Image (cartoon, grey):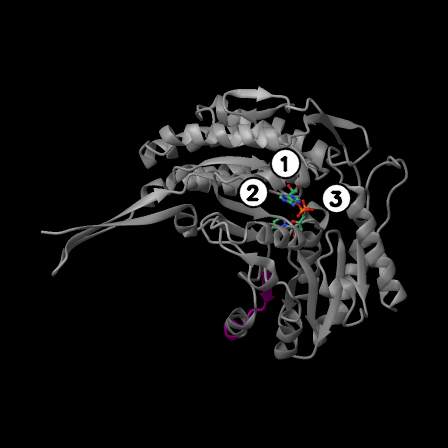
Amino acid sequence: MQMMIGDQFTESVSGERTRIENPADGTPAGEVPSGGAEDVRLAVEAAGEAFLRWSELPNSHRGITLFRSAELIRREADRLALILTTEQGKPLREAKDEVLGAAAVFEYYAGSASLITAGYSERLPRYGYGMVQRKPLGVCAAIIPWNMPVLIAAWKIGAALVTGNTLVLKPSIQAPMAVLAVGEAMQRSGLPPGVLNIVTGNGADAGDPLIRHDAVRKISFTGSIETGQAIAGATAGTMKRLTLELGGNDPMIICSDVDPVAAADAALALRLYNCGQICTSPKRMIVMDEIHDAFVSRLQQTIPEVVIGDGTNPASRIGPLNNETGRAGVEDAILRLEDEGARILRGKIPGGLSQKGFFCPPALATGCADDSRVLSEEIFGPVIPVIRAGDLDEAIDSANSTRFGLGASIWTQQINTAEQAAEALEAGIVWVNQHMKLPPEVPFGGVKGSGFGRENGLSFIDAYTEEKTILISR
Ligand code: NAD
């Protein structure tokens, strides 16, 4: 595939290309250009030129363009999902959910176009009257990870474009192709050239020059805490606006009034989604003493039954992890748990799967040490640590004990318990009797080490525009 810069689908200036591997079997999934600083410069220039016309259009016109993109993405969802599964590894039905989720995000932003308004003050004694205009920022940059590339790209594209900005997007080199295919579909559906540009490449060669480019007014980054910190450091003092959506180690608190079997099934389904590679995947199950053993026993029964396989096989409940570094990290975390004395139960990799696939069977862990890595760091894979809690206060203390603050959930039938936990949990989003749902209608983002700034909801208006006040004397 080629990069998307202005009205061109193009190779990189260097002519170099990067091979993308299918994580299920190591076969080539495709190739993309290896972009660098010169490609970034051309993309930012194209975005700057397009901004002059795009920012002048009525909001509703930009909304209609996003609606048309959504329509085409829905029509081509099967084709886009297959590209995503082949490069990322997730089961095809999850890939299709993601693609359709991206269409829903564009529809949300399209429908919100009429809400991008400012203010007017009719009478200001002594000053006359005042108007507030809402201005787009200009050229924005988006940098995204490989785990949910199409959905996360849609969050950033929808918000930046409907508010009148233009965008240079850099997907992860581990999963750039479905995002390129979405960009190409958007152009076919009528998005003017240069409004969205997609530069493929790795973080050092393409990401770093993009965040440092003088003409970039805002950076919206989703990825690891370490990269987020590097970007915050590199842009400090530049006055660029920055949104950082970083990692998480979400707690899921399960109270004793909940059916332990249903809760264990829900926990497993959530944790196995995308093979556990989701920032808001529940990564610590904190279960009340009274139902702890029944909850664990249900997982002991169901984990060995989890079918692992190629994401294109409809029978596969989980596909491979996306890359070997990630797989080795998850296996290392499990080995350490064993060394620390935790009890581990693993699922099985069936025979017949390619030895070159990055498969990782789910692991149930009980008896984890308080300072174990799975409880304090983000493990991006299907590891399910279960922790026992005596009461709600103890559960909340345990939930809040990490440097993260992305999502958290409380599972109970008691409204007072839910309310108490929702107040006390340190997270950007708290779910009650569900987890990981991120409809575009509500803001999403982290607290503490999980970053700052919000995407979606109506927060996008402030995030992608600035107000200009005009005072007129009478
Ligand atoms: P990563 O931080 O390694 O890479 C993310 C992106 O940043 C990639 O496109 C990469 O090329 C780019 N990058 C790397 N170094 C850069 C630099 N110096 N300058 C500019 N760009 C650079 O993350 P990943 O491994 O791709 O993704 C997994 C991480 O993303 C996990 O920690 C996960 O929790 C997080 N994540 C967060 C959210 C959220 O919304 N909070 C959503 C999904 C994933």
Stretch of the chain drawn in magenta: 407-416
Amino acid at dot 3: Ile
Disc nearer the start of the sequence (2/1): 1
Mark 3, ligand 1, within 8 Å: the answer is: no
* Alpha carbon distance from label 2 to label 1: 10 Å
Vertical comparison of 460 with 4: above or below:
below
Q: Residue 84 placed where, x, y %?
A: 66, 33
Q: Residue 120 placed where, x, y %?
A: 21, 51
Q: Contact (CB < 8 A) between labels 1 and 3?
A: no
Q: Quick check: is 411 in the magenta stretch?
A: yes
Along the horizontal axis of the image, is 306 left or right of 460?
right
In the image, what residue occupies the spot 68% across and 37% down?
202
Kindly identify which numbered label has been placed on residue 318: 3
Q: Which residue is mark 2?
A: 212
Q: Quick check: is 445 in the magenta stretch?
A: no
Along the horizontal axis of the image, is 325 left or right of 50?
right
**Mark 2 packing: few (<14 Cα in 10 Å), some, or many (20+)?**
some
Q: Which residue is mark 1?
A: 206
